[in-house]
Amino acid sequence: MTLTREYAQQLDKEDDLQSFRDEFYVQEDVVYLDGNSLGLLSKRAEKSLLSILESWKKYGIDGWTSGEYPWFYLSETLGSKMAPLVGAKPNEVIVSGSTTVNMHQLVSTFYQPEGKKTKILADELNFPSDIYVLQSQLKLKGYDPSEHLIRVKSLDGNTLCEDDIIEQMTDEVALIVLPSVLYRSGQILNMKRLTEEAHKRNILIGFDLCHSIGSIPHALDEWDVDFAFWCTYKHLNGGPGSVAALYVNEKHFGKTPGLAGWFSSHKEKQFDMEHTLTPALDAGAYQIGTPHILSVAPLIGSLEIFEEAGIEKIRKKSLQLTQFMIDLIKQELNEYGFTFGNPLEDEKRGGHIFLEHQEAARICKALKDAGVIPDFRAPNGIRLAPVALYNTFEEVWRTVQILKDIMKNEQYKKYENKREVVA
Ligand SMILES: *Cc1c(COP(=O)(O)O)cnc(C)c1O
């Protein structure tokens, strides 16, 4: 069967999430495929941000406890709204900090080396920030990262094999931190299996959900994951630098936060201003300082959209979109030297496609000039993320046609094969 524009239009007609596209500021002449780096602004996120500004205007300091969304409770309120996206109870999730800061918080809380168990297990494909956190946490506890940080190797440079990870879960390992979805290849790791295997060996395990939150469903409670953390500006569309979130399994409630601050307090006690901290009895204990209210605000509106659309439907459409893209690329581009760096199976494929090509950097520049927004990942990768809430099947079709044109006419040769500062 040939995949035509008409077929794409037919898929758009049958799409039961199509009405959500109107909720977003999409530019009709641009195909935005970078929602896994920075999601688009929705009208509801804009409205909730304006509403928070309004409460500052109107209430001043009393905005902490007055208005539609009292700021003092916003981190907890939004944490409970986010909980269904990760399969958690409302008080196991708190909106706070940034991915990197939350990871520092959780690793400093859960990494408790003892006797022979001193090592941290991670992987060689993870995002640099995550590795820097582990290296610095090891140093803070007096260990040499070159000896105590184990990074599981990838055989193909793009994906990890769960058996290899499990093999490295030795009795020297105290803690494991892995991504749920790899940021380059989009591979989904089997969190359930990895958690089971870690716990069999008495090892704590946490996941970085940056590339899965808002894109695939999770069941952190059911899988018995110890902790997790994620950003909110990728698939959750919270805006540049929007406040992140974290999950702590309720069985760990009461564990002293590694990095304490006055917002770690039990909320009733916080304003007693005592020099002895009484931590919150839930995930709230892992907050540190005053929440960044203006950067939390867009999430109020954005999370409403997720509640209405439902993560199961989002995942279903996302898989259809990426499958359609894969099929079209195979049909239209097979003579141009692209290879797929992402897993092709549904259960291992996250929300984006990872195309590899030696000319990737300048192909991305040519795509941008032709109105398609991808992102480049050094040295040779093009990430394309068709997002269920605002991208269409027809846009996927258009993207592949544009890419074919660029390759056929060698338009990419007009550009230098080098990345920009922000790629
Ligand atoms: C996006 C991302 C980050 C970014 O962390 P920030 O603290 O928000 O800068 C970290 N780790 C992974 C895996 C990511 O995908």
Image (tube, rainbow, N blue to C red):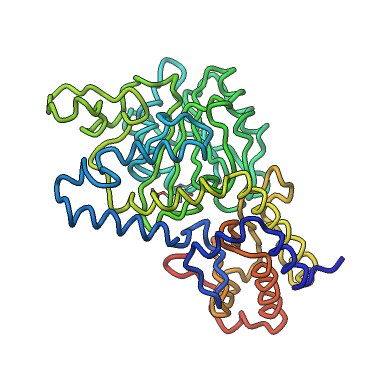
Residue 363 in picture, x, y percent from top left: 60, 73
Horizontal and vertical percent position of residue 208? 49, 40
Q: Classify residue 278 by image quadrant.
A: top left
Q: Position of residue 254 (x, y in %)?
A: 34, 19
Q: Is residue 371 left or right of residue 119?
A: right
307 or 79, which is in the foreground? 307
- Residue 326 in the image: above or below residue 109: below
Which residue is more in the foreground, 418 or 207? 207
Give whichever of 298, 344 is nearer the camera.
298
Residue 381 visible somewhere in the drawing: no
In the picture, residue 14 is in which quadrant? bottom right
| Quadrant the N terminus occupies | bottom right
Give the answer, above or below, for where 185 lies relative to 206: below
Q: Is residue 171 above or below residue 105?
A: above
Give the left or right position of residue 393, taking residue 371 as reference. right
Q: Position of residue 165 (x, y in %)?
A: 61, 32
Is residue 32 in view from this perspective?
A: yes
